[in-house]
Image (cartoon, rainbow, N blue to C red):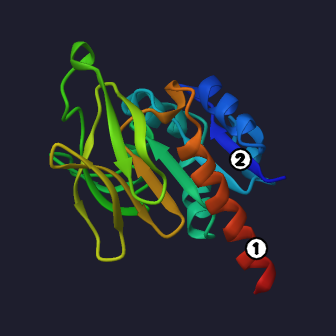
């Protein structure tokens, strides 16, 4: 059984834990740098990216998270988590973790009152995924090695670069666990490759 961590500083943590467990994996709450030890992959949940960054800095987790990423561990960012992963942000001079080769624009689908749901076709995952968008960002550019998995109304809302996965919406706020299962499978395959090498 793989151990999937959820960065548990702020945001939709409990919902991700439920989804991970529904996929047959073990969920681990990550609140301190030492909690990264022993997990096989990490989910950065939706929430408020500015607050999450402040808490990451407060608990001294920025460098340990970068090390975790640079060691090749799979990471999945949803909504605010995507913002944390992105290499660059529109209208911002600095990124956060900056480990995924995408450019992201914050709040590009509007404010909280503009939240909506849409059925999405996600390459390799689902043809009818019920996505929940809340103050959602979108991906404006992807790097050469980054695959676009989904677009909505001409905007990129999900992409993958190797072991990094990011989406604009909140898969954890539905009862559909196919995206979480996709990430769990990504982690399992990564672990098999490590064993081979």
Observer-nearest residue: 41 or 115?
Answer: 115
The image position of residue 99, as x and y in percent, is: 44, 62
In the image, what residue occupies the spot 27% across and 38% down? Answer: 137
Q: Nearer the viewer, mark 2 or mark 1?
A: 1
Instruction: First in sequence, mark 2 or 1: give its number.
Output: 2
Q: Helix, strand or loop at disc 1?
A: helix
Say which quadrant the C terminus sits in. Answer: bottom right
Contact between labelled residues 1 and 2, with CB atoms less than 8 Å apart: no
Tag 2 residue: 4
Separation of disc 2 and disc 1 at Cα?
A: 15 Å
The image position of residue 52, as x and y in percent, is: 47, 32
Q: Is residue 89 visible?
A: yes
As drawn, 159 above or below 195: above
In the rendered structure, the answer to whether residue 122 lies left or right of residue 104 reads right
Can you name the residue that lies furthest to the right here? 1
Residue 61 position by quadrant? top right
């Amino acid at each position: 059984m793989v151990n999937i961590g959820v960065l548990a500083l702020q945001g939709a943590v409990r919902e991700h834990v439920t989804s991970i467990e529904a996929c047959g994996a073990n969920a681990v709450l990550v609140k301190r740098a030492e909690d990264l030890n022993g997990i096989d992959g990490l989910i950065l949940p939706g929430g408020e990216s500015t607050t999450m960054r402040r808490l990451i800095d407060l608990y001294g987790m920025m460098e340990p998270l970068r090390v975790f990423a640079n060691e090749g561990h799979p990471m999945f960012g949803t909504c605010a988590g995507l913002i944390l992963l992105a290499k660059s942000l529109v209208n911002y001079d600095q990124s956060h973790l900056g480990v995924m080769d995408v450019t992201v624009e914050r709040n590009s689908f509007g404010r909280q009152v503009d939240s909506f749901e849409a059925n999405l076709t996600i390459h390799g995952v689902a043809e009818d995924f019920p996505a929940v968008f809340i103050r959602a960002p979108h991906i404006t550019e992807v790097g050469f090695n980054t695959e676009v998995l989904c677009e909505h109304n001409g905007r990129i809302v999900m992409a993958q670069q190797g072991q990094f996965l990011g989406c604009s919406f909140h898969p954890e706020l539905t009862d559909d666990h196919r995206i979480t299962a996709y990430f769990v499978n990504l982690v399992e395959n990564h672990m098999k490759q490590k064993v081979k090498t």
